[in-house]
Image (cartoon, rainbow, N blue to C red):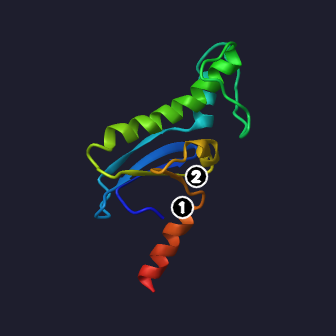
Amino acid sequence: MPEGPLLVADMGSCVTYDILTAEDVFPGGVIAPGFRMRGRAMHAFTARLPEVAIARFDPVPLIGNDTISCMRSSLYYGIEFELLGYYERLKAEYPGLRVIISGGDAHYFERLVKDHIFVVPNLVLYGLNRILKYHV
């Protein structure tokens, strides 16, 4: 597991972005809608947009050329740009910042893995194990 400072992005029903400093302090975070919630909102709150989904291995165009591909682009790249935007803004305040992506939708972002971005699918289990070791 990478050491702090960390930006932990938990990709699920909602996307949470949490900061953990190098001193293991939690100064705060962000809660945003996840893939399905964003897609359902576009469908539910408009008159004619369909409900769309993203499959794991489907290529997603940056710019769509029909309604479905435009919506899929916004779902995928909206979250990607949100994540990278938070990283870019926070790395000045937290030098050496690394990103951990976890949660049920983390696999969609495996291609973002670099020297400062990691995908850890079972992060909650690591945390529970750490708590157990701390208390035993």
Camera sees residue 44: no
Circle 1: is it few (<14), some (14-19), or many (20+) Cα within 10 Å? Answer: some
Q: Residues within 10 Å of mark 2 (few under 14, many from 20)?
A: many
Residue 63 visible in the snapshot: yes
Q: Residue at x 58, y 46 (%)?
A: 12
Q: Residue furthest front?
A: 115
Q: Nearer the viewer, residue 3 or 136?
A: 3
Q: Nearer the viewer, residue 17 or 36?
A: 17
Residue annotated with mark 1: 123
The amino acid at mark 1 is Leu
User: Residue 33, how many percent across, how many down?
Assistant: 52, 36
- Spot occupied by residue 68 in the image (x, y as percentages of width and height): 70, 19
Q: Residue at x 52, y 74 (%)?
A: 129
Residue assigned mark 2 = 103
Q: Nearer the viewer, residue 49 or 24?
A: 24
Which residue sits at x=65%, y=17%? 64
Residue 87: give its label: none
Of pointers 2 and 1, the one earlier in the residue sequence: 2
